[in-house]
Image (spheres, coloured by chain):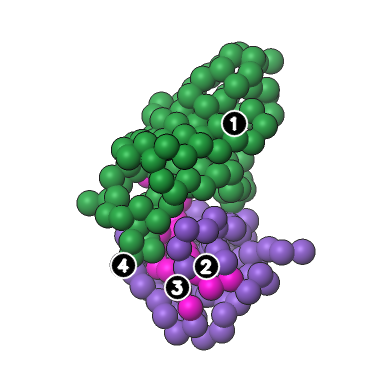
Amino acid sequence: EAQVTQNPRYLITVTGKKLTVTCSQNMNHEYMSWYRQDPGLGLRQIYYSMNVEVTDKGDVPEGYKVSRKEKRNFPLILESPSPNQTSLYFCASSLMTSGNEQFFGPGTRLTVL
Amino acid sequence: EDQVTQSPEALRLQEGESSSLNCSYTVSGLRGLFWYRQDPGKGPEFLFTLYSAGEEKEKERLKATLTKKESFLHITAPKPEDSATYLCAVQNNFNKFYFGSGTKLNVKP
């Protein structure tokens, strides 16, 4: 089944404790992206990647890191999480770099205490 | 600055009562305008892509249209199962995406 998977789905952590949220897609998509969704603010793009080893900042990259060493995986890293990073995170992928619909993962709900 | 504004924030309709959702946008080179549906606790689900002014696309009770400044999602004779949050997004020339904050639609039987 074609899908985008994220792990974990739920995570409660404390300020400053490094964490990684994994994202994987099995559709051989070129473009992958991370978003955070907050009430009233909608989805905001954190980072995106147009291909292996190519990543770019989205609208809200501060406090996050990403890497794209393989085409299928695009992990999101929070080196030192803070409470303002408490949010619902979505990973997405699309076949081509531009003009194609994105397929979204199920989301990761992160709480930073 | 690229941005997307959706209105209204929330919309309550009776079953069968047609209406339209609005998406106004400013973008530095439009690569595509996208409509998604999002159910509570789930990731957005793709509905339509529009590429140029004048384009229209239809799917069941939904029809999306595009001008140079806005897009409309027309819902004809909605059913309770159409209740969801509808999201509009644009992709710009730098391949970045910008989403609106969505319209929460509630269709009552």
The crowding category of the residue bearing disc 3, from other C-alpha atoms within 10 Å (few below 14, some 14 to 19, many at least 20), is many
Q: Residues within 10 Å of mark 4 (few under 14, many from 20)?
A: few
Magenta span includes A41: yes
Q: CA distance from mark 2 to mark 4?
A: 26 Å
Q: CA distance from mark 3 to mark 2?
A: 11 Å
Q: Secondary structure at mark 3?
A: strand
Q: Count the labels in the image.
A: 4
| Residue located beneath label 2 in the image | A96
Marked residue chain, label 2: A
Image coordinates for residue B37, horizontal then vertical, percent: 57, 41
Chain that bears disc 1:
B
Chain for disc number 3:
A
Q: Which residue is mark 4?
A: A62
Q: Nearer the viewer, mark 2 or mark 4?
A: 2
- Between the residue at mark 1 and the residue at mark 2, the CA separation in whole angstroms equals 26 Å
The image's mark for residue A49 is 3
The chain letter of the purple chain reads A
Magenta stretch: dominant SS?
strand
Give the residue at the far right of this rendering.
A1
Nearest to the eye among marks 4 and 1: give it.
Answer: 1
Chain B tint as drawn: green
Q: Kindly identify the residue that appears in the image at 56 percent across and 84 percent down.
A: A70
Dot 4 amino acid type: Glu
Question: Splitting the image into 4 quarters, where does residue B9 fall?
Answer: top left
Which span of residues is magenta-colored? A29-51
Residue of label 1: B62
Check if residue B105 falls in the magenta segment. no
On what subunit does the disc labeled 4 rest?
A
Three-letter code for the amino acid on which mark 1 is drawn: Leu
Q: Secondary structure at mark 4?
A: loop
- Quadrant hosting residue A7: bottom right
